[in-house]
Amino acid sequence: MRNGHTLLAGIAALALFAASGIASAQQTQQDQQGAKGAAQSSTQSQRNEQGAKNQGKNQAKNQSANQGMKNQGAQQGRNQNAKNQNTMSKQSGV
């Protein structure tokens, strides 16, 4: 009877050992998935931050370009006014 108990105890110990190995492997897999998720979240945050920086740069460029167009339009208007003044002066004989 003693040999039977020893055999059962050995089988039980082996089952516990196997179960703890499986549980450890599952925990390792979960840890890896958690680390992967954290890395993806970090990468996404970096992308969002870079996107915000780029958006700010683009807005500054657009504002500068818009101001340049306004300045160019104003200069063209002044040039046209000067031409009109010259034409009027020539017509009036001044």
Image: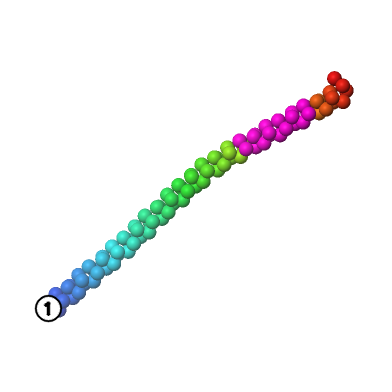
Magenta-colored stretch includes residue 66:
yes
The segment highlighted magenta reads 64-83
Percent position of residue 3, x then y: 12, 78
The furthest residue to the left: 2
Identity of the residue drawn at 58% across and 37% down:
60
Q: In this view, does 6 lie to the left or right of 72?
A: left
Instruction: Name the residue at 62% across, 38% down.
Output: 65
Q: Does the magenta stretch include residue 58?
A: no
Q: Describe residue 73's horizontal placement relative to residue 89 as left or right.
A: left
Give the residue pinned by disc 1: 3
Q: Residue at x 81, y 28 (%)?
A: 84
Give the tally of numbered discs.
1
Image vertical order of residue 19 relative to residue 89, above or below = below
Choose between 9 and 32: the one closer to the eye.
32
Q: Nearer the viewer, residue 77 or 90?
A: 90
Name which quarter of the figure residue 16 lies in: bottom left
Reply above or below: 25 against 3.
above
| 10 Å crowding of disc 1: few (<14), some (14-19), many (20+) | few
